[in-house]
Amino acid sequence: MTYHWDFYTVMQSFDLLLWGVWITFLYTVGSILIGVVVGALSCWARLSRFWWLRLISRTYQELFRCTPLLVQILWAYYALPMLLGISISNTTAGLLTLSLYVGSFYAEIFRGGILAVDKGQREASAAIGMSGVQSMRYIIMPQAIKNMLPAFINQSVIQLKNTSLLYAISIAELTYMTSVVTSETYRPLEAYSLAAVLYFAMLFPLTQVADHFERRMRRSD
Amino acid sequence: MTTTSAVISVRGLGKSFGKLEVLKGIDLDLMPGEVMGVIGPSGSGKSTLIRCLNMMEVPTAGEVRFQGRPVTHKFRGRGGAIGTGELRRKVGMVFQHFNLFPHLTVLGNITAGPTKVLAEPRAEAEAHAMDLLGQVGLADKAKAYPAHLSGGQKQRVAIARSLAMRPEVLLLDEVTSALDPELVGEVLAVIRRLADTGMTMVLVTHEMGFAADVASRVLFMEGGRIAEEGSAEQILRNPTSERLRSFLSRFHS
């Protein structure tokens, strides 16, 4: 039996898929932005000299890194409201979980990047009279960012793909919208193939930009 | 022997890392224009001593004074004390492993301190940096990144970076120890010229000939104490103690 591809039917609903792309994009960017803030805070707490800050940060990181994202999303949407006695919209539950999840990975990426900077760099910047903040800003961070960049981009690429799990709580991102198109057209093969192409089209340029930046930042090597 | 005119004076300085006592009751006075050589076997506390002078290591006993003011390990000094921020602007340090900033060009390395710490205008800082690069013979490397320099060139840039802050004292911590033998000479030549200009320096070194040549005074350290101290001639050419003689004999053989 040969399969008769019929993209025409699916293309009739292309606007739905594009809407899914837009929502996927919003959740990705939103959770990355919040995740960077959360990750930076958690990283700072991990490097703190106060043991209780390190403990809180470590606990947060391990909780989010060692449980599946899908379970976290379902838990935040179905279990957390019962626990707190308040209602949480799927938007809030989805964005919050994605952000905290990616933040836990970012924290370790940031920490590794900072710790990988030679201790002599801090000493040399201190030796010319820089304060801790100046040293961090002008000497440590520029080098740390270079160390972090590949892992950061990689995690962000994964993050975009992770938004597909929001499907489970009916958020209208690309995977969810694809399922809607499938149920309308009865063309899962075409619909999901198209979704894969759209995901690829979003991520491939991003990985290229990442490679470009990495090459540029290696200029000083 | 408290001397008020000393740039740096140290009294009863002690430093322990946990149970390991690295420095024991050090007293010294560094006079303006003096080049003080510090020699001694590995682990004798030479580097720790020089690092205590600019608070890279925080002493566990005794005190360090800069131009008569007590030095604190805090960035800002209070009540007449001098904090590390001000101290390190006036007391430069050059490290064994150069520690150049790899993400900045040679020019960027030298101007980082003046522009960020002293808030000098960029044009002024760059003109001064070019002048210093000329002095260390690297004017043509201003735009290069540290990774593209030889060890000797890196160390000369590191010296220029310290000088860009217009320090009153320069601390040199085994600055030729990480260099290939054929590159040592170019760095020593720069230090010798600095000594000729009257720069006050403390020089931890294994280059005995060089210490004899530029140092006005030499300290021989052993076991965390100053075991012998005197003019370069006296210490290096006419050592009195057996320990110093046996230490020096290793360099003559």
Image (cartoon, coloured by chain):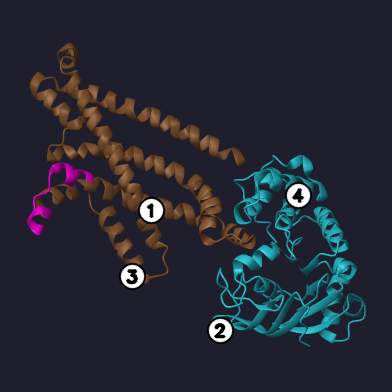
Chain colours: A brown, B cyan
Q: Is mark 4 on a helix, strand or loop?
A: helix
Q: How far apart are marks 3 and 1 (CA)?
A: 17 Å
Mark 2 lies on residue: B19
Whether residue B167 appears in magenta in the rendering, the answer is: no
Label at residue A40: 1
Q: Distance between the residues labelled 2 and 1?
A: 36 Å
Whether label 1 touches label 4, CB < 8 Å: no
Q: What residue type is labelled 1?
A: Ala
Mark 4 lies on residue: B153
Main structural element of the magenta stretch: helix, strand or loop? helix
To the question of a shared chain for discs 4 and 3, the answer is: no
Residue B24: percent from the left, percent from the top?
Answer: 67, 85
Q: How far apart are marks 2 and 4 (CA)?
A: 39 Å
* Picture layout, residue A44 above or below residue A99: below
Q: What element carries label 1?
A: helix
> Would you call the spot at circle 3 few (<14 residues within 10 Å), some (14-19), or many (20 or more)?
few
Whether residue A64 is visible, yes or no, is: yes
Q: In which quarter of the image is the N terminus of chain A?
A: top left
Range of residues picked out in magenta: A80-95
Name the foreground residue: B168 vs A113.
Answer: B168
To the question of a shared chain for discs 1 and 4, the answer is: no
Q: Is residue B130 left or right of residue A18?
A: right
Dot 2 or dot 4: first in sequence order is 2
Q: Mark 3 lies on which chain?
A: A
Name the foreground residue: A69 vs B47.
Answer: B47
Q: Is mark 3 on a helix, strand or loop?
A: helix
Whether label 2 touches label 3, CB < 8 Å: no
Q: Distance between the residues labelled 2 and 3?
A: 27 Å
Residue B246: percent from the left, percent from the top?
Answer: 84, 80
